[in-house]
Image (spheres, rainbow, N blue to C red):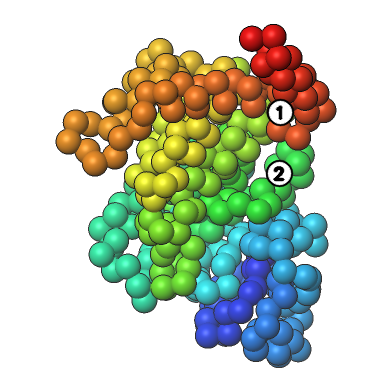
Amino acid sequence: MISVIVPVYNVEKYLGKCLDSILAQTFTDFELICVDDGSTDDCPRILKEYSLKDSRVHVYSKTNGGISSSRNFGLDKATGQYVFFMDSDDELYPESLELLYTAIKKENTQAAVGSIKVEYEANEELRDSDTAYYTIMRSGKVKLTDKIISDFHCSSCGCLFLVDIIRDNALRFPLGLFYEDAWWHWAYFSQIESVSFINVPVYKYIRHPVSIMANTFNKGDKRAIQHLFITDKLFEYWQSKDQLHQRKSTASNLLESFFWFSFRYSPQSEIPFVISECLKIIRKYDLPVENNTTLASINNGELRYLFPSGSTQTIDPSYARYLQIKAFVDQVLPRNSKRRKISYRMARLGYKFLKKII
């Protein structure tokens, strides 16, 4: 059986079509777990109506905690062998679950991944890049490497996952952060050996004006830096499983990719924080930078590489040095730690003493 997990929050305009597309699947052995995340619109009524019509629909209500919290809640309720995540403003094709289930069973893999087709209520200028990103080019069973994991879309939707893998590896979406799909993508696929690829659309993503992804490229939104927070969480996870040492090259490449995204799509006022966060991650996990020009420049404080001549953005060399020192201090003396508070008090006393004798 497949457990389809759908977080729901204030999507009354889209919810009916979403649920209809799930209940119309040619594959019928599934449970539909709808997690109402404190909706204040008509979603609770709609969910109740569907649960009365079809016994496969199970509705749960919780206080608002975000999409990660709702997905984790759904995982705790899931009774199926497989899990499929879906957003409540998107839709499935009639054969979506059947295609994914058939592939994963026939090829004996630990996941199945299909293409995603985007429909536009906003940001239609992204059509070409969306098509390139969400289209699966491979087909059939593939043995996974980190290079292959980096080559297909990071969406947790459009994929079928094994519940045993999720539970055996204590996988849960990170709370309080955007771009949680990127964490899940790397955390899950780095723990399995093979995947079934399906190069036809199995998921219909509706890109509308108020979606998180619609605002990803909005510099005024200040969300882009969270790609680095997600990276930190991922490396922390690998470290907890004693896997980071064998993935340090992958980690450096990932950090560089997420740094440049954060750098390009953050407002100018956020750039120092983006650089500081990247430096902190390099030092925290002792990542190799010698073969990575971007990370080496940040690590050594040679930030001219980031600001080509003619750029209106500049950064003072002394500030670059400050970022290096700050990252080192944060690593040795973590914020809010007792050691840091004691060291701060001792530094203040030493400063006062020096002022008296000088």
User: Left or right: where does residue 217 sit relative to residue 12?
Assistant: left
Spatial CA distance of label 1 from label 2 is: 26 Å
Q: Is residue 225 left or right of residue 117?
A: right
Whether residue 336 is situated above or below residue 140 in the rendered picture:
above
Q: Is residue 252 left or right of residue 180?
A: left
Residue 54 vs 153, above or below: the answer is below
Q: Secondary structure at mark 1?
A: loop
Residue to which mark 1 is pinned: 334
Position in image of residue 218 (x %, y %): 38, 59
At x 49%, y 45%, the residue is: 225
Residue 83 horizontal/vertical position (percent):
66, 57
Figure check: 27 above or below 312: below
Local crowd size for mark 2, using a 10 Å CA cut-off: few (<14), some (14–19), many (≥20): some
Tell me the amino acid under the disc marked 2: Leu
Viewed as shown, does residue 77 lie left or right of 315? right
Of the image marks 1 and 2, the number of the one nearer the N terminus: 2
Quadrant holding the C terminus: top right
Disc 2 is placed on an element classified as: loop
Tell me the quadrant of the picture where the N terminus can be found.
Answer: bottom right
Q: Which one is nearer the viewer's eye here, 266 or 183? A: 266
- Seen at 69% across and 9% down, the residue is 357
Q: Residue placed farthest to the top in the image?
A: 357
Three-letter amino acid code at the position of disc 1: Pro
Quadrant position of residue 109: top right
Disc number placed over residue 171 in the picture, else none: 2
| Residue at 57%, 42% in the rendered image | 230
Tag count? 2
